[in-house]
């Protein structure tokens, strides 16, 4: 928040497809919720308090050097660091509740996804059901839902456009995963 106090948000906002009002405040939609970002902080519109993880992601996003450039290549968070990894990434534990709570109920997942702005994309080449979430302008998140079957348990993968590190730091990507999980669970009443 200290860095946000000195940021020129009206200069960065257009690069993110946003615009600042005459007071330098930037309205932004984040997982289907409206916020106002200014040099004094992040406020939720409608009077609800802005959760700290939302505040952190929005502040970093508005101060980023990201531009309106997407690659269309979606990767798991572990592959966005540039370090090849075998096995699970530390952020995998953040999305475990998705499979645990939605794994045997794709309908519940689909309804929750729609409530937070997700759009069904159909069958992914990998075989799961693909959903695209416009988490922030020029910052989509893809979720691929693999239903459980006789051989394998349900699995849900969260993928980011490979341009994501230009918008936020790795830690904020983890926060984005956490926010996605919280929003889906909340939309499902879990």
Image (cartoon, rainbow, N blue to C red):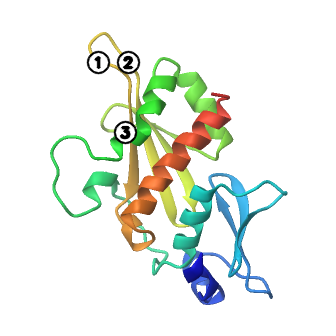
The CA span between labels 1 and 2 is 6 Å
Residue under pointer 2 = 148
State the image coordinates of residue 46 (x, y, percent, origin top left): 84, 57
Q: Measure how far apart labels 2 and 3 are at the Cα level.
A: 19 Å
> Residue 141, position in %: x, y?
47, 52
Q: Indicate whether 89 appears above or below 163.
A: above
Identify the secondary structure beneath mark 1.
loop
Counting from the top left corner in percent of width and height, residue 1 is at: 60, 75
Residue that numbered label 3 is attached to: 93
Mark 3 or mark 1, which is nearer the start of the sequence? 3
- Which quarter of the rendered picture does the C terminus lie within? top right
Q: In the rendered image of this protein, does residue 134 appear above or below residue 18? A: above
Which corner quadrant of the image does residue 167 belong to? bottom left
Residue 152 numbered mark, or none: 1
**In the rendered view, does 182 fall on the left or right side of 41?**
left
Image point (55%, 49%), residue name = 179
Disc on res. 80: none
């Amino acid at each position: 928040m200290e860095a946000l106090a000195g940021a020129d948000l009206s200069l960065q906002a257009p690069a993110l497809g946003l615009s600042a009002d005459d007071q330098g405040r930037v309205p932004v939609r984040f997982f289907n919720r409206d916020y106002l970002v200014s040099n004094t902080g992040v406020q939720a519109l409608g009077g609800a308090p802005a959760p700290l993880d939302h505040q952190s992601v929005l502040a970093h996003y508005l101060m980023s050097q990201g531009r309106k450039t997407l690659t269309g290549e979606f990767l798991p968070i572990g592959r966005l660091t540039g370090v090849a990894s075998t096995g699970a990434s530390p952020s995998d534990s953040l999305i475990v509740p998705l499979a645990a709570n939605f794994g045997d109920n794709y309908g519940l997942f689909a309804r929750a996804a729609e409530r937070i702005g997700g759009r069904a994309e159909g069958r992914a080449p990998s075989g799961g059901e693909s959903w695209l979430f416009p988490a922030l302008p020029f910052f989509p998140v893809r979720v691929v839902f693999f239903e459980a079957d006789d051989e394998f348990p349900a699995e849900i993968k969260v993928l980011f456009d490979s341009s994501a590190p230009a918008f936020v730091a790795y830690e904020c990507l983890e926060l984005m995963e956490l926010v996605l999980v919280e929003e889906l669970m909340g939309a499902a009443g879990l």
